[in-house]
Image (cartoon, rainbow, N blue to C red):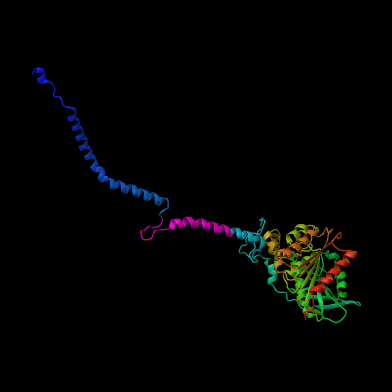
Amino acid sequence: MSYRDEHAPKRIFAPERQAKTWFSMFLGGAFLSVPLLCALPLITLVIIAGCLNALLAWGLLSHEITMDQPDPAPTKLAVAEPMATLEALATKVATLSQARTSPPSLTSMSLTPSIAETPAAPNSVSHPLAGYTIEGLRDRTYPGGTIRMRSVLTTTNFYTRYYVDYPSDGLTITGIMQVPAGDGPFPVIILNHGYIPRDNYWSGAGTWNAAQYLNQQGYLTIAPDFRSWGESDVDNSFFSTGQVIDTLNLVSSLSSLPEADVDRVGMWGHSMGAGVTTKAITIDPRIKAAVLYAPVSADDAQVLARWGTGCKGGQPGGSADECAGAEVLTSNLDERLHRAYRSAASDPQFMYQVSPINYFDVVIAPVQIHIGSADTTTPPEWSYQIRRALQKAGKEVEYYPYPGQGHTFEGEHWRLFMERVAEFFDHHLTNTS
């Protein structure tokens, strides 16, 4: 062996070298794996805890979960809340729909004018004029009193005319009574006059012609001079309710007349008086039949829009166009009531409650309507609206238009009108004794 061979580096075969490398890697991997395997449960717990915290933060586990009783609360909550919202929304829609067809509460009207298209939901504050709404008038009493003969004015073959008076809420109301010839008791027709300027008014104005015709048919007639007309006492009348009160107190006073059959009472009204009649039949079931001759609107908002509101103390410095003559506001009217009246006149909620057209469901009396097609004082559309509303409420109504006739009928048209009126009363005011 040479020196080179003896001192040359010893060569290690490749298999031996690879075996040593794998053994070293195995020992190192085993050494590192032991801590990792020990830490794996802890890591798993950390991950689970993080997930639970995230779920709790999202509100998905707001109730305790047990193996014995799985909690269904999340599912119920997700369904119940939308259902509650839908139910509340449906209730609101139903309430808004009812507001268009049902009157708001009588004693809970706002003093603040409303600009809503339909009456707003009432609040809990009682309106100072609540007693003058249709429901307020229905809730009160009309005691009337004794009809007193002041004088005999005329005696004919068909009737005797008396100048009379009677009490109405502490006032004295005058009027004309005509009693047919013959033996009573007679059916009664109350004749409500239309608007006539007070300076031009006399007792019986606007009704005397109809009275004479009906007297010949066997009817006792009474035409009241409403408060502030003729020699009647003066007092306030909001939305023509003073005239209505005077009329219903007259109905109550009929029992003082031996000539009157209180079970057979009809009512006839022209223009403003027809408006009084329209309100009266929504209040008093003692009225067995009603005739509306060229009536004002049964929606008081339309009446005020055409003629305006009343003025305190009458028409100082103004005109009939500015201060509606049918409204009576005395000079000594309490200022609080005056402000309430002004506010109510522009409040759709209150105007709904004073308008008889919204209360035809309580009407008992059959109704007959007469209107001239050329009437420029009370538009024919108002009469048609009354007819349509009565029909919708299922009430008995007759409707007669008169071509070419204005606010008062003339000639043969007037005679045809009164013939129809007499037939109508004959049919409905049958003897009930």
Left or right position of 203 against 119: right
Left or right position of 432 against 42: right
Q: Quadrant of residue 122?
A: bottom right
The dominant secondary structure in magenta is helix
Q: Which quarter of the figure is the N terminus placed in?
A: top left
Q: Nearer the viewer, residue 217 or 105?
A: 217
Q: Nearer the viewer, residue 347 or 367?
A: 367
Total marks in image: 0
Query: Is residue 174 in view from this perspective?
Result: no
**What's the magenta region?**
62-91
Left or right position of 126 against 405: left
> On screen, 63 above or below 42?
below
How far from the left and from the top, in percent, is residue 328? 76, 65
Q: Which quarter of the figure is the C terminus placed in?
A: bottom right
Q: Nearer the viewer, residue 195 or 210?
A: 210
Q: Farthest residue in the left direction? A: 1
Query: Is residue 414 in view from this perspective?
Result: yes
Q: Quadrant of residue 14?
A: top left
Q: Quadrant of residue 300?
A: bottom right
- Residue at position x 31%, y 47% from top? 44
How far from the left and from the top, in percent, is residue 159? 88, 77
How far from the left and from the top, in percent, is residue 417? 85, 66
Q: Is residue 84 magenta?
A: yes
- Residue at position x 81%, y 77% from top? 187
- Residue at position x 44%, y 56% from top? 74
How far from the left and from the top, in percent, is residue 19? 19, 32
> On screen, 347 above or below 231?
above
